[in-house]
Image (cartoon, helix red, strand yellow):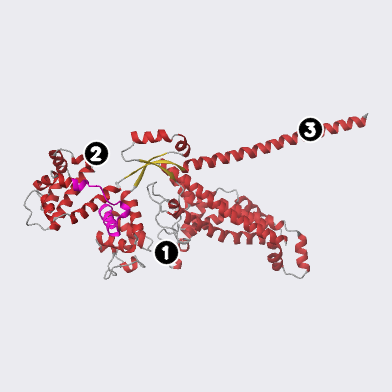
Amino acid sequence: MSNQIEVGIFRTNVQMRNTRGERFRIFYLSSLVIAFLVLIILIASVINQAFGLVAVNYAVDPDELVRPIELENRLETIPETTLRGYFGVDTTELDRATLQSQIYLYYTLLDQVVNKRDAEIPLEELAIQPLDEIMTRIDGIENVARTLRQADMSEDIIRNLAGNSDLWSLILEPNTRIIDDLSEAELGRLIETNASREILTLVYENLSPLSDVREMNGIPLSISIEGSIIPAGWEERPINDLTPAERVQLLIENLSQEQLLALVYDRVVREVILQSWNLNESVLNRGSLETRVEDSLPFGTELRWRSWLSADFITGGLTKTPATAGIYPALMGTLWLMFLTILIAFPLGVGAAIYLEEYASDNFINRIIEVNIRNLAGVPSIIYGMLGLALFVRALSPITSGAIFGTPSNVAGRTILSGALTLSLLILPVIISASQEAIRAVPSSLREGSFGLGATKWQTVSRTILPTAMPGILTGAIIGLARAIGETAPIVVIGTATFTTSVPSGPFSSIVAMPTQIFSWIRESEPQFRNLASGGIILFLAVLLTMNATAIILRQRASRRSVL
């Protein structure tokens, strides 16, 4: 009877344990499913903002940029008698070049009327206005009287030109080319006319190897744009002595038609994204979006499909407009930071772990060191940022700025080297702890066998223990690198650049990284910057996964070698 009772109690206990185990299994499975769902929702949210429709317009209509160039070409081909007939007065004292320049000046006045703030009017609509209305609008242009005096033109001539229907037909004649068909010289004229204040910056960004545009002043062109094509006799002239036309000539001499066209689109045409929609809205409500664009947005606005993660975005430089902004400087800055960080932290962390496990004696001081190393792994990252600011940026500025090596940086100690040193301190505790655990896991029989064969301490460590522990050591390096690549707080405290046109080219370049750039975009008021941030997040995850995959492959190879 007692045996039956004991068997029944045993079965009851087994059932209770199985029930409890099943509950825990369901709990763990539910946790995994919830975590997986949250990850999917997060990734879907990012993807949803990285693709979709955008309403696009231009700050300057490309066709309107081509029109004056086409007009000049037409004026070159029409007979001189027809040209003189446009004026309605005796022009025998004027040569053909003067007549053409006066007609072109008249066209520039019309262009100012068409684009006058708060009184814009299409050129086609202006052409059908009464003559007095046209003259009133021209008279309203600032300093028009002085402009006409300088060109030796009277108001009567302007009236005759404005009232000539044949001239209007010539002006309104459709363009035979688009902006992509213009030559290098014609694109240069567009830059000179419409972006005169940015020409020096364009020369610096595209031709100069110097680290700052201000360094170009007073320096001969042979130095300030070293390696570029310089017209004969200009080698000793400084950039600040050149006229805008001469600076444009440097661009024309050194850039291809495609590069000049890209500059015109970026600095003159300036594509403007008026509104953007996420992927779900773009797919489900496209019809209503087309109606909204047609009814409520300015004339000429186009609805386009846009991938915010594109080749232009990855290879483009940082700009202040979402339509043209890229992430290439931040991408290169992140790669430089990770390369230097792992180059510094990995040998130091592994070396410290080897010393603590294989050479250090088990005493009170060493135990205190190990406890502190484990505690440092939990210190907030912003504390490391403050340490990096005080130590690497300020105290060691001559080293981290490159001044001691003869390559001083224009950002003092706020360089990629300072950022890499700070991030190295951040992940050192992780690498040391993981490496210690990996070394402890090496069977003692391997050590004893090595010593038994006559190997020295270092031979045992380098040829037996390290190869066996390498998979675990690389696991710690992966964890540390994954933490370092995503850290924003230390880099912000040190002083990262959230807007720079220069691409990091070495350890003494200005700090710029993808996490801080994404953070900067998210803070912007324009919603399109959040679309850019989503594209940057996807690229950032791709870089992180690529680095981790590379480390995992190395770990697997090391694991196979240790088994063999």
Q: Quadrant of the C terminus?
A: bottom right
Residue 522, quarter of picture: top left
Q: Secondary structure at mark 1?
A: loop
Q: Please give the residue where the numbered disc 3 appears in the rendered image.
A: 16
Distance Cα–Cα, label 2 vs label 3: 81 Å
Type of the residue with mark 3 = Met
Name the dominant secondary structure of the magenta segment: helix
Distance Cα–Cα, label 2 vs label 1: 50 Å
**Mark closer to the observer (3, 1):** 3
Q: Secondary structure at mark 2?
A: loop
Type of the residue with mark 1 = Pro
Q: Position of residue 182 (x, y in %)?
A: 30, 55
Is 195 situated left or right of 420 in this image?
left
Judge whether residue 181 is colored magenta: yes
Q: From the viewer's side, name the closer residue of 37 and 386.
A: 37
Q: From the viewer's side, name the closer residue of 230 and 293.
A: 293
Type of the residue with mark 2 = Asp
Density class for disc 1 (Cα within 10 Å; few <14, some 14-19, many ≥20) is some
Q: Please give the residue where the numbered disc 2 appears in the rendered image.
A: 118
Q: Are marks 3 and 1 in contact (CB under 8 Å)?
A: no
Q: Earlier in the sequence, mark 2 or mark 1?
A: 2
**Mark closer to the observer (2, 3):** 2
Distance Cα–Cα, label 3 vs label 1: 72 Å
Q: Quadrant of the N terminus?
A: top right
Q: Please give the residue where the numbered disc 1 appears in the rendered image.
A: 408
Density class for disc 2 (Cα within 10 Å; few <14, some 14-19, many ≥20) is few
The residues colored magenta run 169-195
Q: Position of residue 419 (x, y in %)?
A: 50, 56
Judge whether residue 74 is colored magenta: no
Residue in the picture at 14% in, 55% down: 79
